[in-house]
Image: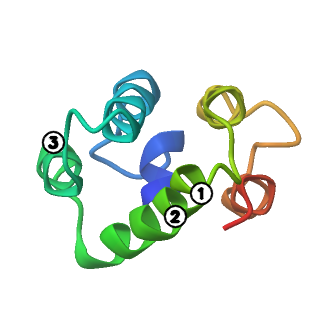
Amino acid sequence: MSLYTRLMGIDTPKISVHAFYSLMAERKRGKVTNQDVIDAFGLSAGEQTELSTLWTRINNDLLLAAELDDVLICAEHRIAPYDTEAEVKTRLGV
């Protein structure tokens, strides 16, 4: 199980893309912490590592909020080319 397969709905419990995106935006604004995100979705150690890698890209403005939202919504609906975990990760640069 990975953060991305849960966002895509491949693995359960599924993570709502909208809720995830919203928490990432609130984290960028300094309104929630990393631990808040971990707790909200019950992330495993491996998923926490993936979150950290993704967060670094977001926090360093290497991945724009609109890009994250667009890619994850397409991935959630398995719209090509974002219909596999590998493609999603490649597009997000993780």
Identify the secondary structure beneath mark 2: helix
Residue 67 quadrant? top right
Q: Which mark is residue 56?
A: 2
What separation in Å lies between label 3 and label 2 (alpha carbons)? 19 Å
The quarter of the rendered structure image containing the C terminus is bottom right
Q: Position of residue 29 (x, y in %)?
A: 35, 32
Disc 3 residue type? Ala
Q: Position of residue 38 (x, y in %)?
A: 20, 55
Return the residue nearer the eye: 54 or 29: 29
Residue 30 quadrant? top left
Q: Which residue is mark 3?
A: 40
Disc 2 residue type? Thr
What separation in Å lies between label 1 and label 3 (alpha carbons)? 23 Å
Give me the residue at 38% from left, 75% from top: 49
Disc 1 residue type? Asn
Viewer-side label of 3, 2: 2
60 vs 36, left or right, is right
The quarter of the rendered structure image containing the N terminus is bottom left
Q: Position of residue 79 (x, y in %)?
A: 79, 30
